[in-house]
Image (spheres, helix red, strand yellow):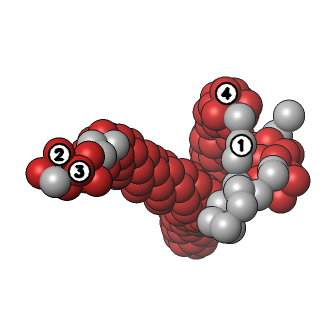
Amino acid sequence: MTIYELLEELEEIINVAPKLPLTGKIMVDANEILDIAKDIRLSFPDDVQQAEWIRREKNSILDNARNEYEKIIIEAKKQADMMVEKDVITERAVDVSGEIYRRADEYSKNMRLRTYAYMDDVLNNFRVKIDELNNKYFDAMYNDMNAHFNDISKKLDSDIKDIRSIAEETQNTEIEKHRIDIPIGESKSEEE
């Protein structure tokens, strides 16, 4: 599965997860979320392989530019060698070979710069997308889960406090009940 498919699956799990009453929070299977996160992590190598392919493509473009450069230089030397016999022809050959050399050098530099710019754009876009995915899904999911667990903890603390209070009231009621069981009227009849 691609990263995008895994993220869609994660969104689907979140969208269909049952809501907890009164909190607006959802309940998800942590193992299922962790498995998807693991699959996403394992999918990164595909994107890294794409970056490697881009690097190889850059090298191929540079190699082609070098080969073209060498062909142009060889051709220029051949043309210059053929024109060596006469001074005018020799001057022209030097001018032409210099121009060819200059063009080939300029072409090679231009190709390298464009390749580096392209690689820079691709890698920056990849990094931005990864950062966006991280911020969009994982940070929000972590914050929601953390807030949810904090809410549950507070609710449990409140419930424990309520139960202890009820238990204490029950115990106090039992003590009061035993005090009330002492017949007050009997002590009056004894005095008479």
Measured in 3D between alpha carbons, the distance from the residue under mark 1 to the one under mark 4, in whole angstroms, is 9 Å
Measured in 3D between alpha carbons, the distance from the residue under mark 3 to the one under mark 1, in whole angstroms, is 71 Å
Q: Earlier in the sequence, mark 3 or mark 1?
A: 1
Q: Nearer the viewer, mark 1 or mark 2?
A: 2
Q: Nearer the viewer, mark 3 or mark 4?
A: 3
Residue toward you, 74 or 146: 146
Task: Give residue 165's position: percent from left, percent from top.
Answer: 34, 51
Q: Which amino acid, by three-letter code, is at mark 1? A: Val
Q: SS of the residue at dot 2?
A: helix
The residue under label 2 is 190
Q: Are marks 1 and 4 in contact (CB under 8 Å)?
A: no
Q: Are marks 2 and 3 in contact (CB under 8 Å)?
A: yes
- Is 121 drawn above or below residue 55 in the view shown? below
Q: Which amino acid, by three-letter code, is at mark 2? A: Glu
Measured in 3D between alpha carbons, the distance from the residue under mark 3 to the one under mark 4, in whole angstroms, is 75 Å
The residue under label 1 is 28
The residue under label 4 is 31
Q: Which amino acid, by three-letter code, is at mark 3? A: Ser
Q: Earlier in the sequence, mark 3 or mark 4?
A: 4
The residue under label 3 is 189
Q: SS of the residue at dot 3?
A: helix
Residue at 71 percent across and 43 percent down: it is 28
Pick out the residue farthest to the front.
192
Q: Earlier in the sequence, mark 4 or mark 2?
A: 4
Measured in 3D between alpha carbons, the distance from the residue under mark 2 to the one under mark 3, in whole angstroms, is 4 Å
